[in-house]
Amino acid sequence: MQNQTSDTKPLMNKICIMGMLRRADIKLTKQRVSLASLLFNFKSGHFTAEDLHDETKIKNLKISLATVYNTLNHFSQNGLIKTLQLDNQKTYYDRNTKNHYHVVNEKEIEDISTDAVKINLDNYEVPEGKKIKSIDLVITLSDK
Ligand SMILES: [Zn+2]
């Protein structure tokens, strides 16, 4: 599909992962390196803590769901990944940290480039003393 952004961090080895954690100022622990390796080699660029926790079970890593949550929040605070709120149900995490929008088609979440959509803010006045920090857009598709 045109205008799709490519996932920037596919299939990374452990050395890359450790370098990335260091650059993000994240102290290296065995569990953090394991979780980062899993999530940057995950088939999907968007996932929940539960998805990642299921993956740790498949890989026979003994990491609790609470640790997965804490680690993902830590990674996101340090800018390694982004959180993504698509609905009120679940928090998704996104390993594409570049500015982009999302299309949700059934259960599939796709990235689309910000160039694919024009947002017109002519009729919106940013309140005094504020600036726009980010614009998140989620396009949800359904059958006609
Ligand atoms: Zn995304």
Image (cartoon, rainbow, N blue to C red):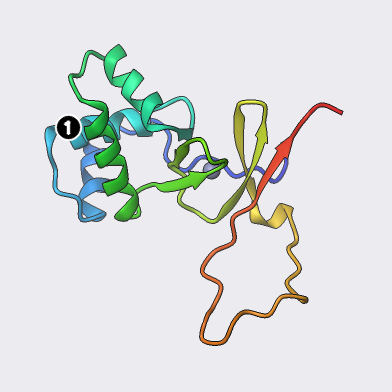
Relative height, residue 122 to residue 140 (above, below): below
Tell me where residue 118 appears, x and y as whole percent.
75, 61
Image point 59% across, 55% down: which residue? 136
* 109 horizontally vs 8: left or right: right
- Quarter of the image where one finds residue 25: bottom left
Picture quarter with the C terminus: top right
In the picture as drawn, the residue positioned furthest to the front comes out as: 88
- Most distant residue in the bottom direction: 128
| Depth check, front residue: 5 or 88 | 88
- Looking at the rendered structure, the kind of residue marked 1 is Gln
Quarter of the image for residue 125 reads bottom right
- Sort mark 1 into few (<14), some (14-19) or many (20+) by Cα contacts within 10 Å: some
Residue of label 1:
31
Across and down, in percent, residue 5 comes to 60, 45
Between 33 and 52, the one lying in front of the other is 52
Establish if 132 lies above or below 69: below
Task: Give the residue at x 81% y 26%.
Answer: 143
